Amino acid sequence: MINYSIQELDMITELPEPIIQHIMSFLTYKDAAKMSVLSKHFASAWNCFPSISFDETLNMGSCARLKGKPRLDKFLSYVSGFLSRRPPRIALNIFCFSFNLEDSYEQPIDSAIRYAIENKVKELKLDIVGRQKFKFQAHYNLPMKVFSAHSIAVLSLKGFMLEPPQNLTLICPSIKELNLEKCKGMQTLKIAGEKFKIVVIELCQGLDKVEIDASNLESFSFGGEAHSSCRINLVTCKFLKYLSLRNAQVTDEWIKHEVAQFLRLEVLKLVYCMNSCSNSNLKTVELRNCFKLQKIEIYARSLNTFAYGGDLKPSQVIIYSPCVHAKLSLRADRGLSDHWYKNLREFLACFDHCKELEIDCDMDMALIVPINVRKNLLAPLYDLNYLKVVTEQKPKNINDLVDGLMWLAPCLSKLSFISNCQEKSLKFEYDIARTIEDDLDCCKLRPIKCWRHSIRKVTMENFEDCENMILEKFLAESALRLEATSREGNACAEV
């Protein structure tokens, strides 16, 4: 038997440095750092690694047991020591720096940023707020040379400030993606650059106006604080494909006229203020918590997704699109009066032409129109083929819910229930030719017959055995012409 020494079998340490760095790139930053202490070759590869990530929350620099200023001193000391050990002029792909600032530490932070810029970093991420969700800690006064650095293509800043508050113009020759979050000290922000593709601005205090001069911009997202009055100017952004505005001072007229100029716009997401918009290339429109919304008009033949979330209002909804999938998230009135159900019927009738309708409601009972209310109303979704209902919990009475939903949409091909990430479905086949016979008292005086007259076959998918039995009995008693029911994977059960 031939005995090999450990050194003879250790092939990985003989790998070229770029391959070792490639292996390290699949590890977490903390595990890659641990790997670097196993050999001098690994340590050399680590010291030249093109990506650097400093995160105080990972207890770097043995600061786990410390708090406040001693913890931050220890962490920043670790950062300075690490950077001093790296060879000079090593090009950086990514430089991330994240910690919770509680005092003035500009010198060590400036040194770290200067190191990244001098080593031609491509992606710079600075999180000076750390992971504090609800508090604005002491902000960092960022040096303006960051924005003019020619190597930076992606810049993410969280927690920087300007003192005193001022109007800021950022001319960024090389940046393609800019993210600003929880920054303050800006009253008016103007961003200019021919290479911009993505701009995201979130929760920046005191911001009154944002103007973007970037003809090649494709995506813009703005999220203001509650009651924000920030104005948005995107006139030059003719190639915009994605637009998301939350808590911005955007009037209905702005939406109506300005959006029409974004000829390539595909996704529009708004919170507050929308009346109508016309854009033939729109593919997605999302409206959330639009409390003042009274009317929606969307002219977009390419639209395939419309999402609405908020209180049910007797709003007029006009969507000019032949194949839209609508997603409605509704909050029900706790009283569930007759007025609620009449408003529900009026609102749902606006989506009768949809290819698919998904309703997410916090109460199952809110979707079951009482019998006495149905007598004076017509079904709102007669032409709908596919209805999907999302509930937090399994329906308490599956029969009542099916009956209520089938009254809303009496000609469904498929009815699905989704709860706890599980989908259960009913598929229907009809005998349309026989629906004209007036053989049930429930619809004698109605021009349109209910679902009970014409269902010939029902296929049940993914229901539990007890639910299958309950539904089979209910359908057999309720559907006059039902010939058969079947379960997915089971033999057909004759009625």
Image (tube, helix red, strand yellow):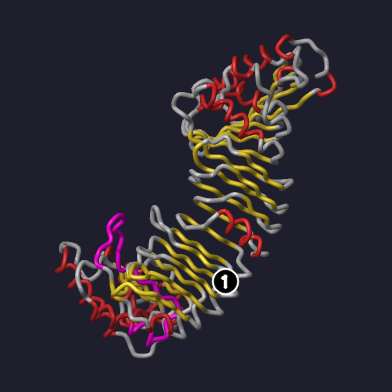
Q: Main secondary structure of the magenta part?
A: loop
Using the image, determine if residue 291 lies above or below residue 98: above
- Assign the N terminus to one quadrant of the image: bottom left
Residue 99 position in % (x across, y down): 28, 67
Question: In this orientation, which residue lies closer to the viewer: 72 or 316?
Answer: 316
Q: Is residue 64 left or right of residue 215?
A: left
Q: Is residue 11 visible to the viewer in this orientation of the structure?
A: no
> Circle 1 sits on which residue?
217
Q: Is residue 120 magenta?
A: yes
Residue 156 position in % (x across, y down): 41, 70
Residue under the image location 44 percent in, 68 percent down: 179
- Quick one: SS at disc 1? loop
Give the residue type that dot 1 points to. Leu
Magenta residues? Answer: 114-138
Q: Is residue 222 visible to the viewer in this orientation of the structure?
A: yes
Quarter of the image holding residue 282?
Answer: bottom right
Question: In this orientation, which residue lies closer to the viewer: 344 or 30?
Answer: 344
Disc count in the image? 1
Quarter of the image holding residue 81?
Answer: bottom left
Using the image, determine if residue 89 lies above or below residue 353: below
Residue under the image location 28 percent in, 64 percent down: 58
Number of other residues with Cα within 10 Å of mark 1, as a class: few under 14, some 14 to 19, many 20 or more: many
Using the image, determine if residue 228 lies above or below residue 350: below
Question: In this orientation, which residue lies closer to the viewer: 339 or 192?
Answer: 339
Residue 233 position in % (x across, y down): 53, 67
Residue under the image location 62 percent in, 31 percent down: 346
